[in-house]
Image (cartoon, helix red, strand yellow):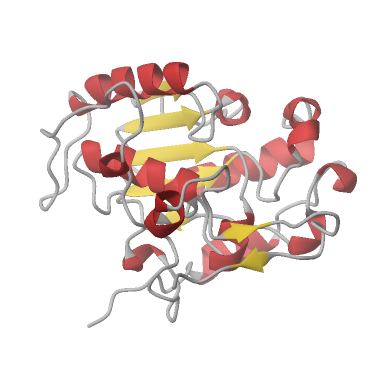
Amino acid sequence: MAEFDRGPTDAFAELCARVPDPPDETAFWFDWGPVFHRGRLDGSARVLVVASDPGPTERIAGRTLVGNAGQRVQGFLAKLGLTRSYVCLNAWAYAVHPSRAEAMKERLGDPAQAQWRNEFYSAATGPALQAVVAMGFMAQEAVRLWTDRPQQTVLVRVPHPSSRDPVALLDGWRAAITTLRAVVAPDDDGDNTGPDYGTEFAESDYRPIPRRDLPFGAPAFLGDDAWVRAQGGQEPNSVTRPSPDDGHTLVWKAPG
């Protein structure tokens, strides 16, 4: 039987429906709406990954961390031997304009935002949780504000997968894998004994997004941008926001 993500429970969907609007709509790609999660929502996640905000590929998929950055994260999880026991969330459910990111970091603590986000994080995790990985400054602030974060879990702070400082990114992720391999139990079909990161990202450090993380009917290439990376260039995703109407237009290319 084909695997696919059947979506959240009614209770979790009700929580998602209560997501507050951003504190400043002009700082977000607000008209595209929110994107909430990827991975397990049943309390079986051993690792919670928190990143910043959804990108254009995430909007197409309706799941977070599925573009080039998400495929790097999937490679990170694979190095821990995790094939399914994880959940990926963001600091913001709406996509943030990069030029406004620092200002919006300061708004993560707005009462309505913090209350909903903390409830969301707690609802998405359970007693199986062994570690929280906060990727980037936005995620690290959101996790700092998570008042009910289970204190027995390991918290690892690393650069965001889209960081433009590859040395810091790889150094941080390499150290995190070493730390987390001693903490996180791999899945039965996973392997946490493979190589750690080298001095630059290799294609082998990426992993396609599993079909079980994507909605039914998603095309086979969604979540696997190896063909885009193989072409070179600065844009590693199959989905882009074109200028000048990036607020209302996405360009999605299929391979071949």
Residue at image point 35% right, 32% down:
201
- Above-or-below relation of 172 to 76: above
Q: Is residue 190 left or right of residue 149?
A: left
Residue 128 can be seen in this image:
no
Question: Residue 150 falls in which quadrant of the image?
Answer: top left
In the picture, which quadrant includes the N terminus? Answer: bottom left
Q: Position of residue 73 (x, y in %)?
A: 39, 41
Residue at image point 38% right, 55% down:
226
Question: Residue 107 falls in which quadrant of the image?
Answer: top right
Question: Residue 56 falls in which quadrant of the image?
Answer: bottom right
137, 162: nearer the viewer = 162
Q: Position of residue 157 (x, y in %)?
A: 45, 21
Q: Position of residue 206 (x, y in %)?
A: 33, 45
Q: Is residue 235 left or right of residue 17?
A: left
Residue 176 can be seen in this image:
yes
Q: Position of residue 112 (x, y in %)?
A: 77, 41
Residue at image point 12% right, 42% down:
191
Task: Tally the marks.
Answer: 0
243, 52: nearer the viewer = 243
- Above-or-below relation of 25 to 105: below
- Above-or-below relation of 143 to 203: above
70, 125: nearer the viewer = 70
Residue at image point 18% right, 42% down:
81
In the picture, which quadrant includes the C terminus? Answer: bottom left
62, 69: nearer the viewer = 69
Q: Is residue 97 left or right of residue 139?
A: right
